[in-house]
Each structure stands twice: as C-alpha cells, then as structure tokens.
Amino acid sequence: MSMIAILLTSGLVTVIAVIGLADAFTHLLCWSARSLREPEALRADSPSADAARRERLVA
C-alpha cells in the first residue's frame, strides 16, 4: 500500500511540475511576442529597475 502512495504522490508532483513548466514557457512566448510587437514592453516598470537605469546613465 505504501508503494502505491509513493507512486501516486510522485506522479502528482510530476504532473504539477510539468504544468508549471508549461505555464512558464507560455509566459515566455507571450512576453517575447509582445516585446517584438511593442518595443516599450522591454522596459521594466518597477521602481528599482528605474533607479538602476538612472544610476547607469549618471555613471
């Protein structure tokens, strides 16, 4: 019985991992397509990224 539980658990973890990888790949494809269509999409909108960009420009 414990062997069946181990197989079911590892199978479930594998399925969740595959779904996560598929989701990440889909986000990467969508981001790439958007950045090719809109150059502004390449810019980061976070304040820390803006601060880092300003520091590079000043230096």
Image: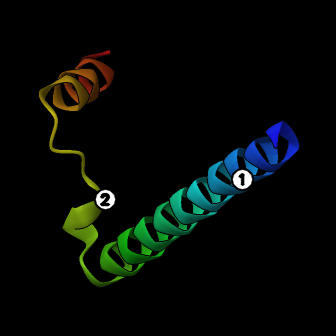
Coloring applied to the structure: rainbow
Q: Quadrant of residue 32?
A: bottom left
> Which mark is on residue 8?
1
For the point 54% across and 67% down, the residue is 25
Q: Is residue 6 left or right of residue 52?
A: right
Precedes in sequence: disc 2 or disc 1: 1
What amino acid type is highlighted by mark number 2? Answer: Leu
For the point 20% across and 65% down, the residue is 40
Mark 2 surroundings within 10 Å by alpha-carbon count, few (fewer than 14), some (14 through 19), many (20 or more): few
Residue at disc 2, secondary structure: helix
Residue 16: give x, y in percent of width and height: 56, 56
Residue at disc 1, secondary structure: helix
Q: Is residue 58 left or right of residue 2?
A: left
For the point 79% across and 41% down, the residue is 6
What amino acid type is highlighted by mark number 1? Answer: Leu
Q: Is residue 9 left or right of residue 28?
A: right
Q: Nearer the viewer, residue 50 or 30?
A: 30
> Which mark is on residue 42?
2
For the point 33% across and 23% down, the residue is 56
Q: Nearer the viewer, residue 26 or 43?
A: 26
